[in-house]
Image (spheres, rainbow, N blue to C red):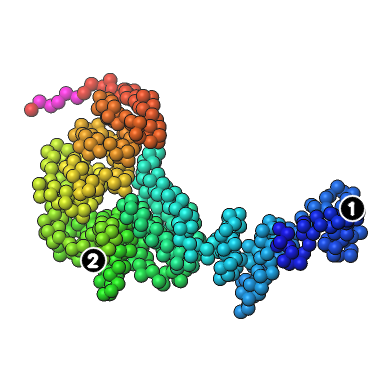
């Protein structure tokens, strides 16, 4: 503290100590020091005794004066930074040079930090002093820290890492939360999602600094490669669009994915890739110039975002329905070709970035000529069954025998991620319209999907959400067997699948036969390897099942009417 004041020519603690050491009258020395270094205002000196009469210490008085001066100074600095003309930064640098020596004095530090905050370029010597002092670094504004971070990637990584971990935890919690029975994960519109705490903090940390933005993208690519967690792809898109919302052109103009991401974001908001958007997206993909193929790596991350893949897959099912309605071949539909192309890019994002081979995956033509027609055929069968049930009172659709898809279908979903995703979303469509027969035909095949894709949380969340809306169907043995025995139970060694199973049981347990329910609960009992969350959920579910009271059957009331005693008329003889 003394050294800082000395540099400004202001006597400090060391000077007072020296004066007391060399004086004969300490009280006189203190009074002299106060007179020389106090507030040099003639009208103030006579008024100070009144403060003494009111029991107000001189320290309190001087502290209040200092606080007011700091407030006025910081206000003037902010005004200078915003409306100070062309030489405003020269003035701020001059102020900083004079005031920086006292930055370690807590009482006046806010003034120095305020000057630093409003300087677009701070001298490295000042930044080094701030970096080496943990207290100064902690109190420095984000605007100052940005200038430290841009030349210190490891430090920036340490600051960003907890936020990235928090983001993943929040996404997992949203997918696995059993307390909400509806389809909550895909419900929020993109603009609302990116108002989240983590995204907003990251955007604030980046500011307009392109170097920091590039660092964040590199962190996300690295973590995506290391974990294969596609939530990092979501965060990549959300950060760019949050920066777009703030109109930070310094970053948007240099990110080659900006307009493509903006278009995909609009599709997610509208929950469909319509014809106009499809042409726009195709233009972006076809417009990648030679030598810029590396852009495909980032574009594939944007399309690997679960929200993007969900929109593309839903749009694919709508196009297939359109083919059924118009009696056209899927391979002739241009929109379907683009959707499958984008789906392939998204599903191949990890491999492309890992191999650094920036080429679009070559589409298997047999997907259009063999597999997709099989799915269309199933949709047609579903419609025929539904229409027949409406026009014929004697037809019972649930009595139709279940026919599993062909072996060729099985070969496709085992080997092809695109075929798997289409099959998965066909099953979601069957559940959404509550077609129990279609569900019983398709769901047993999902366990064979490529790379166990049907057990991803981003699919199981909507899958379970639709199941919860079909409680009455769980009273049918065939449906319960398909959902539990054929699909969920074989994979409950994975904690996430177990949590999805417990979420289903939470809402439909009262419709399952007691014997089957007891068997399922016994098999689903968590072990010591499972987390505390799973154990708590299992215990809560056990209590809920044991305390469940079936709704009483309402007895049929007899009509209290005098007509009930009137005998029925005798039929006329033939």
Q: Position of residue 245 (x, y in %)?
A: 45, 64
Give the residue displayed 77% in from the left and 59% down from the top. 12
Q: Nearer the viewer, residue 198 or 281?
A: 198
Binning the other alpha carbons within 10 Å of mark 1 as few (below 14), some (14 to 19) or many (20 upward) gives: few
Q: Nearer the viewer, residue 13 or 113?
A: 13
Tell whether 370 sits left or right of 245.
left
Residue at the left extreme, as displayed? 574
Q: Nearer the viewer, residue 73 or 504?
A: 73
Q: Nearer the viewer, residue 228 or 250?
A: 228
**Picture quadrant of residue 328:** bottom left
Q: Position of residue 357 (x, y in %)?
A: 25, 64
The span picked out in magenta is 569-573
| Residue 27, numbered circle | 1
User: Is residue 425 rendered magenta in the image?
Assistant: no
Q: Can you say which quadrant of the picture contains the C terminus?
A: top left
Q: Position of residue 423 (x, y in %)?
A: 20, 50
Give the residue displayed 23% in from the left and 55% down from the top. 317
Helix, strand or loop at label 1? It is helix
User: Is residue 571 rendered magenta in the image?
Assistant: yes
Binning the other alpha carbons within 10 Å of mark 2 as few (below 14), some (14 to 19) or many (20 upward) gives: few
Give the residue displayed 91% in from the left and 59% down from the top. 46
Q: CA distance from mark 1 to mark 2?
A: 84 Å
| Residue 359, numbered circle | 2
Q: Position of residue 346 (x, y in %)?
A: 27, 59
Secondary structure mostly taken by the magenta-highlighted segment of the chain: loop
């Amino acid at each position: 503290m003394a050294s800082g004041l000395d540099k400004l020519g202001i006597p400090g603690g060391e000077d007072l100590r020296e004066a007391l050491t060399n004086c004969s009258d300490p009280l006189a020395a203190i009074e002299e020091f106060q007179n020389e270094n106090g507030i040099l205002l003639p009208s103030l000196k006579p008024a100070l005794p009144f403060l003494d009469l009111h029991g107000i210490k001189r320290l309190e008085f001087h502290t209040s004066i200092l606080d007011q001066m700091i407030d006025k100074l910081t206000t003037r600095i902010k005004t200078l930074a915003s409306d100070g003309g062309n030489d405003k930064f020269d003035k701020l640098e001059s102020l900083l040079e004079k005031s920086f020596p006292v930055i370690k004095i807590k009482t006046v530090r806010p003034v120095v930090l305020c000057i630093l905050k409003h300087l677009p370029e701070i001298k490295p010597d000042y930044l080094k002093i701030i970096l080496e002092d943990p207290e100064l670094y902690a109190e420095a504004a984000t605007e100052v820290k940005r200038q430290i971070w841009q030349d210190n990637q490891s430090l920036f990584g340490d600051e960003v890492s907890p936020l990235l971990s928090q983001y993943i935890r929040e996404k997992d919690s949203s997918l696995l939360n059993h307390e909400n029975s509806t389809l909550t994960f895909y419900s929020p519109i993109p603009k609302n999602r990116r108002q989240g705490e983590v995204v907003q903090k990251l955007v604030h940390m980046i500011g307009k600094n392109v170097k920091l933005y590039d660092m964040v993208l590199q962190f996300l690519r690295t973590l995506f490669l290391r974990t294969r967690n596609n939530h990092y792809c979501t965060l990549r898109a959300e950060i760019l669009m949050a920066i777009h919302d703030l109109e930070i052109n310094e970053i948007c103009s240099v990110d080659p994915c900006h307009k493509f991401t903006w278009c995909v974001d609009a599709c997610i908001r509208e929950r469909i890739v319509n014809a106009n958007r499809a042409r726009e997206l195709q233009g972006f993909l076809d417009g990648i110039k030679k030598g810029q193929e590396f852009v495909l790596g980032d574009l594939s991350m944007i399309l690997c975002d679960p929200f993007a893949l969900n929109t593309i897959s839903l749009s694919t099912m709508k196009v297939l329905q359109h083919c059924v309605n118009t009696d056209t071949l899927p391979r002739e539909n241009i929109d379907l070709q683009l959707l499958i192309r984008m789906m392939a890019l998204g599903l191949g994002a990890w491999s492309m970035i890992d191999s650094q081979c920036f080429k679009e995956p070559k589409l298997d033509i047999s997907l259009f000529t063999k597999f997709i027609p099989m799915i269309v055929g199933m949709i047609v069968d579903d419609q025929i069954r539904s229409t027949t049930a409406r026009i014929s009172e004697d037809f019972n659709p649930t009595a139709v025998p279940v026919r599993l898809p062909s072996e060729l279908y099985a070969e496709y979903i085992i080997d092809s991620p695109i075929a798997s995703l289409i099959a998965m979303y066909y099953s979601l469509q069957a559940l959404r319209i509550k077609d129990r027969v279609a569900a019983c035909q398709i769901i047993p095949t999902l366990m064979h999907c490529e790379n166990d894709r049907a057990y991803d949380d981003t699919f199981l969340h909507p899958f379970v959400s639709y199941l919860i809306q079909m409680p009455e169907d769980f009273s049918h043995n065939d449906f319960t067997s398909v959902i539990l025995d054929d699909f969920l139970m074989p994979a409950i060694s994975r904690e996430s699948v177990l949590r999805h199973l417990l979420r289903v049981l939470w809402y439909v347990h009262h419709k399952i036969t007691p014997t089957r329910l007891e068997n399922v609960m016994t098999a689903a009992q968590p072990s010591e390897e499972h987390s505390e969350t799973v154990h708590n959920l299992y215990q809560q579910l056990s209590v809920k099942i044991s305390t469940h009271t079936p709704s009483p059957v309402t007895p049929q009331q007899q009509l209290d009417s005098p007509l009930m005693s009137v005998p029925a008329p005798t039929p006329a003889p033939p």
